[in-house]
Image: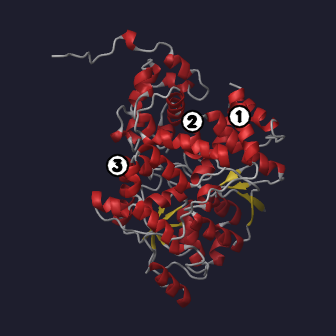
Amino acid sequence: MEMTRTIKYEADRVKGFGEEVMSVPGCEELKDCIQCGTCSGVCPLSIYMDFTPRQVMEMTRFDFKNEVLGSKTIWLCASCYACTVECPRQIKITDIMYELKQRAIKEKVYPRGLPTPVLAQEFTKMVHDYGRVNEILLATKMYMKTNPFAAMGMAPLGLGMIKTGRFSMIQEKIRGRADLARMLETVDEGK
Amino acid sequence: MKYSYYPGCSLKGQGRAYEESLLPVMRHLGIELEELPDWNCCGATAYMAVDEGKACVAASRNLAIAEKAGLQQVLAPCSACYLVLNKTQHLIHDYPHIKSTVDRAMASVNLKYSTDIPVRHPLDVLISDVGMDAIKQKVTHPLKGLKVAPYYGCQIVRPYATFDDQFNPTSMDRILEALGATVVQFPLKTKCCGGSLTGTLPEAGLRLSYIILKEAIKRGADVIATVCPLCLFNLDSFHGKIAAKWESTRIPTVYFSQLMGLAFGMTAKQMGLQRGLVPMKPLASAPACCAARTAAAAS
């Protein structure tokens, strides 16, 4: 019978990860976390998370990089900021979740098959190319890339959107899209 | 005063009834709105998840355009736009590395970001600049007997509480009361609707919408009033799925601006009420022609 170790050794952690995150402006207060669990209590989505927000805070601080960046938790955060305004230590938890999402995308370690990071990246491409987002085209792209069958389940809703005059497949474009693209590219050049 | 109107993508897309109702209502109250020229998407919650620097650059282009046009105030009706534009200003202000990223991007296209133009929500403008008396004076068709659940959603009061209380906002409650409606006690007024999770992870997102709908019905509301195109979409679009999973929660959700227009004597059609998937019942106080049109739109 194959046995697996369920407790992590210190050597399994990615040393320096916590320090690195806490050095990012806006994430510094993470060092003050008292593990009270208020964030997990007020989070409307913690019941679906693999690690609660409180656990993510502690795991980030103590270098559990692979577990945190590969978690579903960070992609279940809907940015409602309930944790941020309730935290007794003024930790910007939503912003830390954003920081972790950015790192997971940069290192391509987010869980496969999870539509949220796919949607986020398609969204940024649309903004870069056209300057505006068409919600119907964006949702279609996301479904095609993640779960084309789910798109069929959305057909009645699509019909409802057509009936109520809210359905459009026309991609709006801004005049200054070359300027916007240029501006966005300066960010990569500055890194 | 003249405001620069930043519609955002939703108000030109699936949330167009918000624009259709808000613009005539504001005009009726003497507020002049001029659409920001060549505005781009604010980035919503998605861009910040991919690249914070780029998210700030995209959002700040709009603020720089407003500045160049000499406009004093920006009006952002969508909750995500309102938060992102405000948050971008906070980040530019607080973090030198964000400021230099934005400055570099601006310089590459001869734009400049030098002042923090106030970015305001229509509720803020209505209660602070227009005032309750001016709103009351315009009410010709009071919404008598209409029980409304005021639903604010998350992002206009969190994380920044600029014009209303963070935990128990009342600006919309007061406006609805001024229209003659009965505002029901609604403790879930700032609870999250699920945001984009209703599309990406429906098993989690839909529950949040269901909880809000269920509570509004339990509180005896006839209709839910909202301030956000995504909140309205979530609360209006998934009744079939919610009924299949839990129970039927068919209650209409409308924009607060649509109710304002009805109380000001505008027709249901003018207010875009036919764009809701769960139609609102015609009001007893509505003019005969208007009630007929609402009924026609509902059938």
Disc 2 from disc 3: Cα separation: 24 Å
Foreground of the two, A15 or B92: A15
- Disc 2: host chain: B
Quadrant in which the C terminus of chain A is drawn: top right
Quadrant in which the N terminus of chain A is drawn: top left
In the image, B262: left or right of B59? Answer: left
- Disc 1: host chain: A
Residue that badge 2 annotates: B50
Disc 1 from disc 2: Cα separation: 14 Å
Q: Is residue A81 visible?
A: no
The amino acid at mark 3 is Glu
Residue that badge 1 annotates: A185
* Disc 1 packing (10 Å; few <14; some 14–19; many ≥20): some
The amino acid at mark 2 is Val
Secondary structure beneath dot 3 equals: helix
Q: Quadrant of residue B99?
A: top right
Give the vertical position of A157 relative to B196 (above or below). below
Whole-percent x, y for residue B2 in the image: 78, 62
In the image, B3: left or right of A107? Answer: right
In the image, B79: left or right of B34? Answer: left
Which circle marks residue A141 in the picture? none
Give the vertical position of B281 relative to A159 (above or below). below
Disc 1 from disc 3: Cα separation: 37 Å
Foreground of the two, B259 or B99: B99
- Disc 3: host chain: B
Give the vertical position of B272 relative to A73 (above or below). below
- State the residue at coordinates (26%, 15%): A5
* Disc 3 packing (10 Å; few <14; some 14–19; many ≥20): few
**Residue at the limit of the structure toward the top, as seen here:** A11
Residue that badge 3 annotates: B203
CB contact under 8 Å: marks 1 and 3: no
